[in-house]
Image (cartoon, helix red, strand yellow):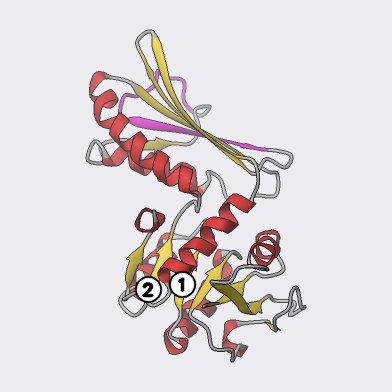
Amino acid sequence: MTRIILYGCNGRMGRMITDILKDDREAGIVAGIDKFGEPSGNFPVFQSLAECDVPADVLIDFSSPAALSDILENAKERKLALVLCSTGYSDEETQRINKATEEFAVLRSANMSLGVNLLLKLVNEAAKVLLTQGYDPEIVELHHNKKLDAPSGTALAFADAINDAVDYQYANRYERHSAKEKRPVPEIGISSVRGGTIPGEHEILFCGPDEVIEFRHVAYSRALFGKGAVTAAKFLAGKEPGMYSMADVI
């Protein structure tokens, strides 16, 4: 059985993962981490990983980048594999994560959905053909009004999948109001919408002469991401040090 420590156990995703694992015979939560230290399930809750003394195999983090120092400083000693589901890491934080993969297994993905990770591959293949024919790539992402980072990590992952197809010749463009000019050719437009309770929606457009090719993914529930994180945790338990992604899982 995969023993899981859940960082951010009292948040929306934390409670959802707790519910998902309630009847799972292959994995279970043995401890939770939450800054308020309040019980949220049938397991002990600590205010930091440093305080947690419960043996485990994998840590799932659905909190925020602010938790990264606590996680990285204690994961090696605890021999924990990490499933990092938070987005919005800075360049410096990303470098720290990459360095940590020399010591233990880390799975990091901008999106834990099977469908999104399959779509990333399809978008990359489409870009190899369409960008050489002068099609303009645009990304529109929609999320709930509580989301802190913009654009979403998933939108940036789609931009990276597009740019990878052309050896990173394109630049990301996040706004157009500051300059009155026609659209430069080597750019990927990214637009963000925040409102209501939208779990997540991404549209990738390749706009060409007389036609538009559109890829679209819609998440109807956050449970989608919770199930992906649990699947990732089961996969990562016992793995050698290194960086893994949902592409490895699927």
**Can the viewer see residue 85 in this picture?**
no
For the residue pair 148 and 143, the one nearer the viewer reads as 143
For the residue pair 150 and 214, the one nearer the viewer reads as 214
Side of 84 where 199 appears, left or right: right
Q: Secondary structure at mark 1?
A: strand
Task: Give x and y (percent) for residue 195.
Answer: 70, 38
Q: Is residue 186 magenta?
A: yes
Task: Give x and y (percent) for residue 159.
Answer: 39, 39
In contact (CB < 8 Å): disc 2 and disc 1: yes
Which amino acid type is shown beneath numbered disc 2?
A: Ala
Side of 11 where 181 appears, left or right: left
Q: Residues within 10 Å of mark 2 (few under 14, many from 20)?
A: many
Sequence-first disc among 2 and 1: 1
Q: Residue at x 63, y 52 (%)?
A: 223
Reply above or below: 92 against 171.
Answer: below
Reply above or below: 206 against 149.
Answer: above
Find the residue positioned furthest to the bottom: 53
Label 1: which residue?
Answer: 82
Give the magenta range.
179-194
Q: CA distance from mark 2 to mark 1?
A: 6 Å
Side of 97 where 56 appears, left or right: right
Q: Residue at x 55, y 72 (%)?
A: 27
Image quarter of residue 212? top left
Q: Is residue 193 magenta?
A: yes
Q: Residue at x 32, y 75 (%)?
A: 241
Label 2: which residue?
Answer: 105
Which amino acid type is shown beneath numbered disc 1?
A: Leu
Task: Give x and y (percent) for residue 54.
Answer: 59, 89
Image quarter of residue 199? top right
